[in-house]
Amino acid sequence: MIQKFIELGQGYGDIFELCEIMTTNKHRIHHTFAFVSDIDGKKVASIAVALKPVGESKFMPIYICREGIPYDKENQSKRFSIFENTVKELDELLITLEVKNSSVYVDEQLYYHYLTGVLRLYHYIPAMY
């Protein structure tokens, strides 16, 4: 199974696009994620959805809006609320994970390899075969 992160932007339009991808592909949703990290003492979230492969394909896309959303459980940002409400409407479980920030990595592809490893370790996505 090949998993690949497909990065969307960090603005409102990108959040709506991610939510639309989830709504139109509800039957393909594997898991939804909030990756929480720390940047200079502030918590930020990346939100993502992993979709099941189409037909006989061995490709699992993971759409992500990376680290553009302030994360505060008590005082949630509008962007995070929009995503969380879509997850609830689709009757899915939002998996929240504390991860390293992408700024730790020299290359964003290394960061995505790290996230893929974390998701495989916890069996949230299938192993590579």
Image (cartoon, helix red, strand yellow):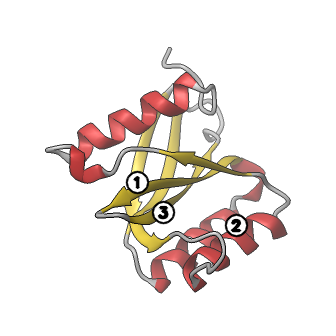
Q: Determine which of the numbered discs, if any, sits on residue 45 in the image.
A: 3
Q: Position of residue 76 (x, y in %)?
A: 61, 78
Q: Earlier in the sequence, mark 2 or mark 1?
A: 1
Q: Residue at x 69, y 69 (%)?
A: 84
Specify which label sits upstream in the sequence, 3 or 2: 2
Mark 2 vs mark 1, CA separation in Å: 17 Å
Q: Position of residue 95 (x, y in %)?
A: 67, 48
Q: In this orientation, which residue lies closer to the viewer: 120 or 50?
A: 120
Report whether residue 107 is seen.
Answer: yes
Mark 3, mark 2: which one is toward the viewer?
A: 3
Q: Residues within 10 Å of mark 1 (few under 14, many from 20)?
A: few
Q: Secondary structure at mark 1?
A: strand
Question: Which residue appears at 81% of the width and 64% of the height?
Answer: 90
The dot on residue 24 is: 2
Give above or below for 61 relative to 89. Answer: above
Query: Considering the numbered disc 3 on the image, is that residue within a helix, a strand or a loop?
Result: strand
Residue lying furthest left: 106
Residue located at (59% from left, 74% from top)? 80
Q: Residues within 10 Å of mark 3 (few under 14, many from 20)?
A: many
Residue 86, how many percent across, how many down?
Answer: 73, 71
Residue 117 point in image, percent of width and height: 44, 28
Determine the residue positioned at 70% across, 66% down.
24
> Does residue 58 appear in the picture of this structure?
no
Label 1 sits on what residue type? Ile
Mark closer to the chain start, 3 or 1: 1
Q: CA distance from mark 3 to mark 1?
A: 16 Å
| Identity, as a three-letter code, of the amino acid under mark 2 | Thr
Three-letter amino acid code at the position of disc 3: Ala
Alpha-carbon span between mark 3 and mark 2: 23 Å
Task: Identify the element where label 2 is drawn.
Answer: helix
Q: Which mark is residue 6?
A: 1
